[in-house]
Amino acid sequence: MKKSILLSLVATSLLIVGCGGGSSTSAATNAKITGTVPGTLIEAFCDNGYYAQVTSTQNGTNQHPFEIEVPTGINCRLIMTTNENDPTNRVITPIAFSNGSTIVLNSDVNLGNIPLELNYQNADDKDGDHVVDTPLNINSNGAETNDNAVQDADGNGIVDSYDDADDDNIPNAYEDDDNDGIPNLHDNNNDQNGNDNNNDQNGNDNNNDQNGNDNNNDQNGNDNNNDQNGNDNNNDQNGNDNRSN
Ligand SMILES: [Ca+2]
Ligand SMILES: [Ca+2]
Ligand SMILES: [Ca+2]
Ligand SMILES: [Ca+2]
C-alpha cells in the first residue's frame, strides 16, 4: 500500500519534470539564419509582425559572418543592405530563392556566402529608390521556401518598410518620420530629440517627455515620468511614480 503511493508519487513527479522540459523547448521557437556577407545590415521580416536586424561582424576579410534569429514555422523575408550609411551608394537587396522570396525555418540554416552587390552603379535599380529591382537568388540550403507575401499591406511584393510611400526615392525605412536624425529603421521611439529612451527589458517605449532624458530605470516597462523637466524621478524597482505627491 505504502509502496504503491510512493511509486505513484515518483511517477507524478516524473510527469511534472517531463512537462516542464517540454514547455521550455516549445518556448524556444527561434532558429538561426547564418552565413557570410560583405559589410552588411541584415533584416528579417516575418509574419505576425516579427522583425529583427543585425549587422555582419567585421572580421578582416570580405566575408563577414552574420547570425539572425527568426521564429520557426512562419514566413520570413530577408533584406540585406550594403553601404547602409551612404545614401548615394546604398544598395538594398531583397533576397529570393528558387521558388519565391519567402523562407520558413524549421531549424537553423546556413545560407553560405551571399554575393551582395557593393557598387550601386552595378545595381539594377531603374526606379532609383536604391532597392534592387530584381531580388538576389540564393540557395536556401534545404530550408522550406515559398512566395507568400510578408508585411506587405499594399500587395506590391515588397515589405512595406521598403516601399517608398512619398515617392521621393528614399524607402520608408530610411525616412525620419519624427525628425530626430535617426532613420525609422534604427529609431525605437517616437519622441522628438534623437535619444534612445528605452533601456528596459520589455521593448516598451517608456518615455513620453520632450527633453531626451531617460526617465525610466526600472525593470517593469511602466512609464514613471510624465513631467516636463528631464529629471529622473524614479529609481525604484516597482514602477510607481514616486513624485506624484
Ligand atoms: Ca528599385
Ligand atoms: Ca509593400
Ligand atoms: Ca520616401
Ligand atoms: Ca527618427
Image: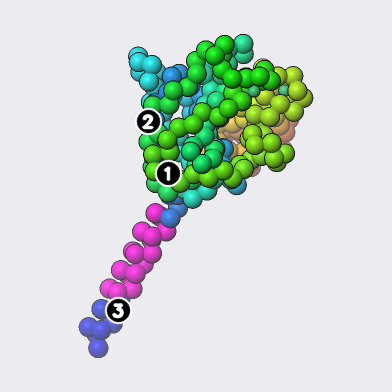
Could you tell me which secondary element the residue under label 1 belongs to? loop
Mark yes or no: residue 204 visible: yes
Residue nearest the observer in this picture, 36 or 26 = 36
Residue type marked 3? Ser
For the view shown, which residue lies furthest in the front direction? 98
- Camera-near label (3 vs 2) is 2
**Circle 3 Cα neighbour tier, 10 Å, few/some/many (<14 / 14–19 / ≥20):** few
Residue 216 at x, y percent in the picture:
60, 33
Q: CA distance from mark 2 to mark 1?
A: 13 Å
Name the amino acid type tagged 1: Ala
Quick one: quadrant of the N terminus? bottom left
Give the mark nearest the N terminus, 2 or 1: 2
Q: Nearer the viewer, residue 133 or 38?
A: 133
The quadrant in which the C terminus is found is top right
Whether residues under marks 2 and 1 lie with C-beta atoms below 8 angstroms apart, the answer is no
Identify residue for label 3: 8
* Nearest to the observer: residue 122 or residue 74: 122
Label 3, label 2: how far apart the Cα atoms are: 52 Å
Q: Is residue 183 visible in this depiction of the protein?
A: no
Left or right of 205, for residue 13? left
Q: Residue at x 42, y 35 (%)?
A: 139
Mark 3 vs mark 1: which is more N-terminal? 3
Where does label 1 land, which residue? 143
Residue type at tag 2: Gly
Magenta residues, as a range? 10-25
Q: Main secondary structure of the magenta part?
A: helix
